[in-house]
Image (tube, rainbow, N blue to C red):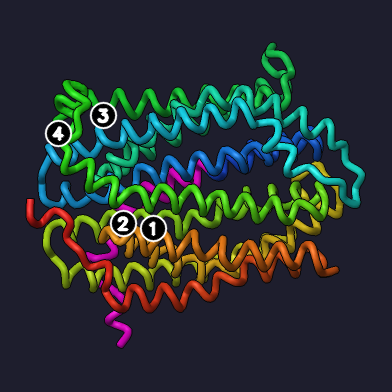
Amino acid sequence: MLKKYIGDRAFYRRVLAVMIPVLIQNVITNFVSLLDNLMVGRIGTEPMSGVAIVNQILFVFNLSIFGGLAGAGILTAQYFGKKDNEGVRDSMRAKLWIAAGITIVAGIVFIVYGENLISLFIHEGEENLDLAATLEYGKDYLKIMLIQVPVFALLNVYSSTLRETGETRLPMTAGIIAVFVNLFFNYMLIYGKLGAPRLGVVGAAIATVIARFVECGIVIVRTHTHRGKNPFIKGFYKTLYVPKEMRGRIIRLGTPLLINEFLWSGGMTTLNQVMSARGLEVVSAENICSTVSNLFFCAFFAMGTTVSIIVGQLLGAGEIERAIDEDRKLIAFSVAQCFVVGIVMVILAPLIPHLYNTTDRVRELAASMLIVNAIMMPSNAFTNACYFTIRSGGKTIITFLFDSAYIWVLSIPITLILVKFTALPIIPIYAISYGLDFLKCAAGYILVKKRIWVNNLVETE
């Protein structure tokens, strides 16, 4: 029985070859984000809260880029499995157009409505924090961070294509270099070291922008100068035309994914905004919790990418039964490793918030939220792997219902009711809100078991 869920050494070697570079990049990126967060947090609670709110808003853009490119990315992985470089090239051109469109819309929204969006998260709480100062810190941070928005989009066009074609080391290497660049300039510009002015949150934003340019530059230059390794990039900019048939296919695949990622990230941001009604200290605690949790969540984030790459390539190559078998083992592996990671997270949860220069109440809330997230780790790993399994076969409408419809129809209304109409403390509300995801496990199991995702999208071409 267990043999159905456990692979041989060759299987795990292949899995780790894909997963480890993605995992390393994610861990280092999120670890430096944690250090970045700590550096801003050392200035005070208000600057940390202002930055956290803006990052929540930018999170919606980041996930929209991810979702917008995902439809074309499904085809990229399957074209690569079919060894069709022209198909990979055309799907990457489609990504360029999609990224440009999302960036323009997001830029307009951030410029016109940025202050209003930040204000939605700022509410009086128990700690009597300075709400006006928090708003100003957020506005200052957002103005600088807007510069990196188009760079982030272009970086993801290249990085996602590289990963889908099996090249995970270049994005990893560029990410590692970028995070150390970010750390260096954070230290210099936040605190005014090495002769630089003390810029606080503005310095943190400038450091992030510099790092993003460095990362994007490395990825683009290395991709174009190693055409033998990346044959799809040959002649990439000779035309930006995308065949009509592919446009239609990407629209059918990608639109639900774009809407899904926009609504899911918007839903997560809305959940945080709903809970922020209990006070600014909740925003600060959620910021600490999410930044630290993301470091641990790298375990199942990396496995999600691994599932989409391995299963997508097998489907594109027509190896259906092998795709089914390996997907089952990938899901089991993801859950097992996240069970271990969750235990480590529970142990560290009470200690990490004390690294921040904030109030005891914020530290207490953050520690409790971290424990809730740790308990949810195995179920998160399962639902995440199920999501990427279903997506790898192009069943994007179902992924939309599985992901976004769930959070807006169930999680947000229940959380809103608990916050507005009950006297429950914020931690039980937080636990109930995120604990609802256990129900997704049952749905994910049924959908994967029924094999609705088994679909070769490039077979007839």
Q: Residue furthest top?
A: 195
What amino acid is at disc 4?
Answer: Pro
Q: Which one is closest to the eye, mark 2 or mark 3?
A: 2
Q: Residue at x 23, y 45 (%)?
A: 248
Segment tinted magenta in the rendering:
1-29
Looking at the image, can residue 79 be seen? yes
Residue that badge 4 annotates: 231
Question: Which residue is under mark 1?
Answer: 304
In the figure, 295 relative to 411: above or below? above
Q: Residue at x 12, y 39 (%)?
A: 85
Q: Quadrant of residue 350?
A: bottom right
Q: Position of residue 251 (x, y in %)?
A: 29, 46
Q: Is residue 407 left or right of residue 129?
A: left
Q: Earlier in the sequence, mark 2 or mark 4?
A: 4
Residue labelled with disc 2: 308
What residue did someone put label 3 on?
223
Please name whichever residue, 433 or 329, is drawn nearer the observer in this view of the structure. Answer: 433
